[in-house]
Structures are given as C-alpha cells and as structure tokens.
Amino acid sequence: MQSWVNKLWYDGHILRFVLWPLSLVFAAITWFRRLLYTVGVKPQAILPVPVIIVGNITVGGSGKTPTVIYLIELLRKQGYKPGVISRGYGVDIDGARSVFVGDSASLVGDEPAMIVARTHVPMVVGAKRIDAAHQLLNDFDVDIIISDDGLQHYALGRDIELVILDGERRLGNGMLLPAGPLREGHWRTAVVDHVIVNGGEAQRGEQQMLLQPTLWHSVNGKQSPSNAPQPEQDVVAMAGIGNPCRFFETLADMGYRLDRVQAFDDHSAYSKATLTALAAERPLLMTEKDAVKCREFAKDNWWYLAVDAKLPPSFDQQLLARVKQVAEEKQR
C-alpha cells in the first residue's frame, strides 16, 4: 500500500488528477477548521511553559523523532528541563499515559518508546495532546514542552513551530490529501519559525539537518558493539520508516553488501517468525525505531544503527533566544 501511495504522491501518477476534487474538499474543511481557532470560536489551550511543536505538512516520516531528540539534548545543555508529548501513533490509549524506559512500543507507540529509551526524558502520550501536556506538567518537573508532531492540532497553543521536510521528497506533487501528501498547503512553511530540511539540500531560509550514523547496538542488548557486522560483510537490511530507501543507501555508503533489503510500511508491527525468515541466519540490520518493536524477541545477530541529528549553530542560537524570550514572558 505504501509503495503505491508513494507512486501517486511522488512519481507523478496520473490518478492524482482524479483525486483532485477530493483534495479541494479537504482544503475547504481544513481552512474552516483553522478559521474557527483563529477567530476564537474554538479555544486554544495556553500552557504556562514554552511549547515547541515539531511537525510537518506532509504525511509520513520526515525526521521528526531525531529532531525531538536533538532538541532534548540542546535544551538540557542550557539548563532547561524538557518534557515531551505525543499522540502515540497506532496505539489505543484511554486518556493519557506516561512513558517509561522499557515500555513496549505496542502500548505507547514506537516513536515514544524510542525517544524515552534514548533520552530518559519525561514523556506522556495521549489521543488529546492537551490532556497529555497537563499530565506531563502535573507529574514531572518540566519547564518546557516539546510536542512530537501536532502541527495541525490547533487546540494546543504553541510558541515555536518547526516544520521538518524530507529534503529528497520535499512536498511531492504539491497537492493536498488525498491526491498528494500535503496536510496543509505550501503557504504553511512561510508562517512557522523554522523549516528544517532532513537530507537533500536546504533552500534559502531553511535549516539543513543531517543524520549522522553513530554506533551499532545489539537489538536484544546482549552483544557488544565490537561484535557488530563490519563493512564489506553480507547483511540483510530492513526498515519500516517513512523513507526506507534512505536507510538502505546509508548502509551502502558505509560499505555493507546488502544481500537483501525489505521495506515495511511505516509503524509496521513485526513478528519473530517473519524477521527470522527474512534474515535466514545472516546479520539483520534495522533502524532504531524498528528495534524498539523487536527487542523482546530479537536474535543475537540483529543490530540497529543509532543516528544523531546535526543542525547549524545559527539554528541553536536563534531557537534558544526565542525560548528564553517566551519563558520570560510567561513568567511575568
């Protein structure tokens, strides 16, 4: 399904013109919904601490999770105590739920499980981000909130908006859902604080982000990184992210011989039987996001590659200056 949608949205499939009338309906609905919040018919929840939204205007993965992790580490270095909220994609949560190290991705979502496993940050997931934010403030000592996704969740007031774009795919065919990948029109990028481009080449006014591979980690935690597969070794690779090809290209650039690659839909659930058959005793390489869904049943020769986001110092300076300004205003 995902591969077919990618052809429609990114490869110029003619069916996009058939779906265009539905995109007009979607545009009208989203415009009216935004208007209700703009004129105050629907209220926005204004929180007592700065709120940073890390979102996108396209459907699918673009690099939000590495950006969230980058912000957590950046803010901590400056003495802030960040917390994170998320919808918890693909899981049914009644109310709001705190996320702790070791929580199953099937209970809290793969991205929240990954973020907390990596950073130990206070985090709450919930269908309503406002409820998650209130629980985060009530249960944890945080002085700034990062929302993983939620750019279009206008009920939540925000102070800083970051849009993440896939630098290779960008806005696809430029059409709104369902004919194209856009949740909102291209105009939206002009009214956010920063547009961060993951890979590809940033355009004027955009911030370039690079994802740099760091270390291999054993998925089940039983092996030392020194035992990880070495470049020029035959391996099997899998990825269930927004753009699996990017992961496969990274491995090829690192010198690995990809005997077989398997792309899964974003947020796919995995079973031991399926992945064991895929690997067939060869080393199985995956992303960190995939690994949190496999750690309970992973074999010793399954590995995930951790990556770190890198952004320009100018972005750090501008963001931190804005955070300081907002924090001071909210303390008055």
Image (cartoon, rainbow, N blue to C red):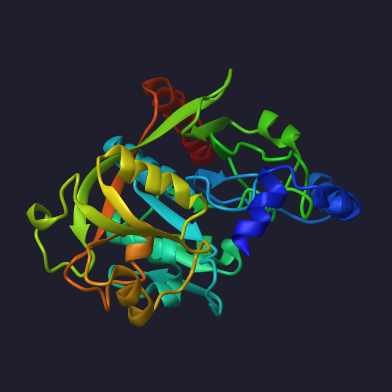
Check the image and report above or below for 228 versus 166.
below
Residue 133 vs residue 329, the one in the foreground: 133
Foreground residue, 273 or 92?
A: 273
Residue 137 pos. (x, y %): 45, 60
Q: How many marks?
A: 0
Q: Quadrant of residue 121?
A: bottom left
113 with respect to 109 (left or right): left
The residue lying furthest to the top in this view is: 204
Residue 102 is situated, as x and y percent measured from the top left of the image, at 28, 72
Say which quadrant the N terminus sits in: bottom right
Above-or-below relation of 169 to 302: above
The residue sitting at 39% across, 24% down in the picture is 312
From the viewer's perspective, is residue 246 above or below residue 314?
A: below
- At a point 84% along the width and 47% down the height, the residue shown is 35
What percent of the width, then of the height, locates residue 232? 19, 45
Viewer-side residue, 89 vs 119: 89
| x 9%, y 59%: residue | 224
Residue 299 lies, with reference to residue 83, above or below; the image says: below
Residue 120 visible somewhere in the drawing: no
315 with respect to 167 (left or right): left
Give how far across and how far down residue 322 sits, in percent. Answer: 49, 29
Residue 269 position by quadrant: bottom left
Q: Would residue 68 be found to the left or right of residue 190 on screen? A: left
Note whether residue 63 is visible: yes
